[in-house]
Amino acid sequence: MKELLLYIARSLVEHPDQVTVTEVGTSDDLTLELRVAPEDMGKVIGRQGRIAKEIRTVVRSYAQRTGVKVSVDIVD
């Protein structure tokens, strides 16, 4: 799931080398913290949070196949 989130985020931003994902939590309840460059934050969040919402939906649906509960946090 970490690789999926990295792929999606790197596709959206202008500075893909500054994208990092940190896994926090247990194997059954996982939180992925996404960090991007400050100037790319708007591209990852989108207007009214639409892109961020869709990123969370894609990652959650992928995680559901493996039986893991995942949440995605976009961190400053």
Image (spheres, rainbow, N blue to C red):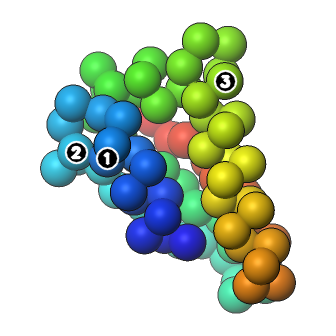
Residue depicted at 54% across the width and 26% down the height: 45
Say what amino acid the circle numbered 2 marks. Answer: Pro
The residue that disc 3 covers is 50
Disc number for residue 10: 1
- Where does the N terminus fall, quadrant-wise? bottom right
What amino acid is found at the position of numbered circle 3 in the picture? Answer: Arg
Labelled pair 3, 1 in contact (Cβ < 8 Å): no
Q: Residue at x 30, y 33 (%)?
A: 13
Say which of 47 and 22 sits in front. 47
| Numbered tag placed on residue 16 in the rendering | 2
Query: Cα distance, mark 1 to mark 2?
Result: 5 Å
Task: Tell whether 57 sits left or right of 2.
Answer: right
Residue drawn at point x = 33 percent, y = 43 percent: 11
Q: Residue at x 17, y 50 (%)?
A: 17
Which of the two labelled residues, at mark 3 and mark 1, occupies the earlier sequence position?
1
> Which secondary structure lies at badge 3?
helix
Tag 2 secondary structure? helix
